[in-house]
Amino acid sequence: MRSQGYVTMLDPFQRKYGERMGGLLYIPALMGEVFWSAAILAALGQHVTISYFTYTFLNFVLPITIHHHRHFIPQKYK
C-alpha cells in the first residue's frame, strides 16, 4: 500500500470503485469513530463519578463517623 502511495485504508477502494464509493465507505468508518469516542467518554464519566463518590465517602463520611464513635459514644458511659 505504501509503495502505491495510498494514505488511508480507503484509498485502494476509492481508486478501484471511484470517488463516490470511497465517500460512502467513509460513513461507516466515521460512525465507528464517533460511537467509539462516545463509549470511551461514557466510561470515563462513569469512572470519574464512582471515584468522586468514593473520594467523598472516604474523606468526609468516614472521618465524621470515626470522630462520632471516638468522642460521643464514650461520654455516654461516664
Image (tube, grey):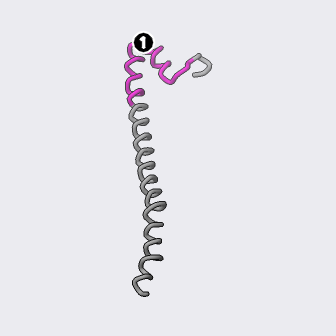
Q: Is residue 51 magenta?
A: no
Quick check: 35 above or below 53? above
75 or 8, nearer to the observer: 75
Question: How many other residues sit within 10 Å of disc 1, few (<14), some (14-19) or many (≥20)?
Answer: few
18 or 34, nearer to the observer: 34
Q: Which residue is mark 1?
A: 18
Counting every numbered tag in the picture gives 1
Query: Image quadrant of residue 14?
Result: top left
Residue under the image location 42 percent in, 44 percent down: 45
- Which quadrant of the rendered structure holds the C terminus? bottom left
Quick check: 11 above or below 65? above
Residue under the image location 50 percent in, 18 percent down: 11
Q: Which residues are magenta?
A: 6-31
Residue under the image location 46 percent in, 53 percent down: 51
Residue under the image location 43 percent in, 72 percent down: 68
Instruction: Examine the residues drawn in magenta and state their main secondary structure.
Output: helix
The outermost residue toward the top is 19
| Rendered location of residue 61, percent (x, y) | 43, 63
| Rendered location of residue 34, percent (x, y) | 40, 31
Q: Is residue 18 magenta?
A: yes
Quick check: 3 above or below 46? above
Q: Amino acid at mark 1?
A: Gly
Quick check: 31 above or below 20? below
1 or 64, nearer to the observer: 64
Q: Secondary structure at mark 1?
A: loop
| Rendered location of residue 26, percent (x, y) | 41, 22
| Rendered location of residue 7, percent (x, y) | 55, 20
The outermost residue toward the right is 3
